[in-house]
Image: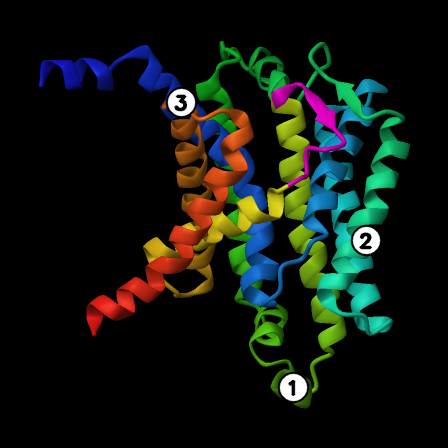
Amino acid sequence: MDTFIAWITSAQVKSLINNMFEQGALFSFLGIGVLITFRFFRFPDLTAEGSYPLGGAVVAILIVKGLDPYLSTVVAVLAGATAGMVTALVHTKLKINNIISGIVIMTAIYSINLRVMGRANTPLLSSPSVFSRIVQIGEPLGLHVKATSLTNIIFLIVILLVLSFLLYSFLRTDLGLAMRATGENEVMIRSLGVNTDNTKILGLAISNGFIALSGALVAQNHGFADIGMGIGVLVAGAAAVLIGEAIFGDRTAGWWILAAVVGMILYRFLVALALRVGFTPTDLKLVTAVLLLIALSVPRLRVRVSN
């Protein structure tokens, strides 16, 4: 018992927990973005694997050129939203399959990211970020804020709560309900006079805006933006959504948002734990696949147990 208590209070476990919440909060915006297309529109939008590194590339190059990190982050979000809108326009106006539309735009964004950064990797270690600015903002107010993992977690949770509340409030409006209904029954909602093309454009813009925000924050937190940082993010986001849904079930929009956030935090914890117990970074895709299969199996297991 004493050995277990000593392990729980060890610096290694504290580091694991800090990493879980910090990385989980960073990637929760990705989880929310994937939730919008994966659950509300019922298709995996592959644009995510382009808009995520696009957010990182845009914020990196703007910060390097001297623009304020907060303003740079907003521009990165708008860039991601634009990518989502383009995918929706290709799908709705050119009548191309939604998955193919995402693949086409994802492929195009790869070259755009290289154009934006001018190279495959842009370092940010010596540049200001939204996280380092927390310390500077606190000084005039007489607050002695230290640049620690806990500070970053609190900052990210505040942003996450604000944006989650705004999204939840929007989803309860007539336009938000129409957007959700588009994914549930497009024919029915169109017969009620709703322009489903516009709801798809808006939905994909919001989704990829969240995903680009995640990419921008991760780039600033990790200290670099890389052209390959988006590989596999859609699967990670889907895993988070499914893990959260396995815990909370299929409920209201508010519960879905909470499930996506909790699912991402648990997903990052399991990934960090896998690395701690001996898995190598090259095994992470295998770990993600296993977690995804488990999350997909939980609803079916519940049905069998209840029967």
Place of residue 88 in the rendered image (x, y in percent of width and height, measured from the top left): 77, 63
Badge 1 local density, few (<14 within 10 Å), some, or many (20+)?
Answer: few
Could you say whether the residue bearing mark 1 is in a helix, strand or loop? helix
Q: Quadrant of residue 272?
A: top left
Q: Give the alpha-carbon distance from disc 3 to disc 2, as whole Å.
A: 37 Å
Judging depth in this view, the residue of 263 and 73 nearest the camera is 263
Q: Nearest the camera: 63 or 89?
A: 89
Residue under label 1: 187
Drawn side of residue 183 relative to residue 226, left or right: left
* Residue at disc 2, secondary structure: helix
Tell me where residue 6 sits by quadrant: top left
Write down the region rendered in magenta.
222-231
Q: Quadrant of the N terminus?
A: top left
Residue type for callout 1: Val
- Amino acid at dot 2: Ile
Residue 82 seen: no
Residue under pointer 3? 278
Real-space Cα separation, disc 2 to disc 1, in angstroms: 26 Å
Queried whether the magenta region covers residue 36, the answer comes back as no
Numbered badge on residue 105 = 2
On screen, residue 41 versus residue 259, left or right, reads: right
Give the alpha-carbon distance from disc 3 to disc 1, as whole Å.
50 Å
**Above or below, comparing residue 226 to residue 298 in the picture:** above
Determine contact: label 3, label 2, CB under 8 Å.
Answer: no
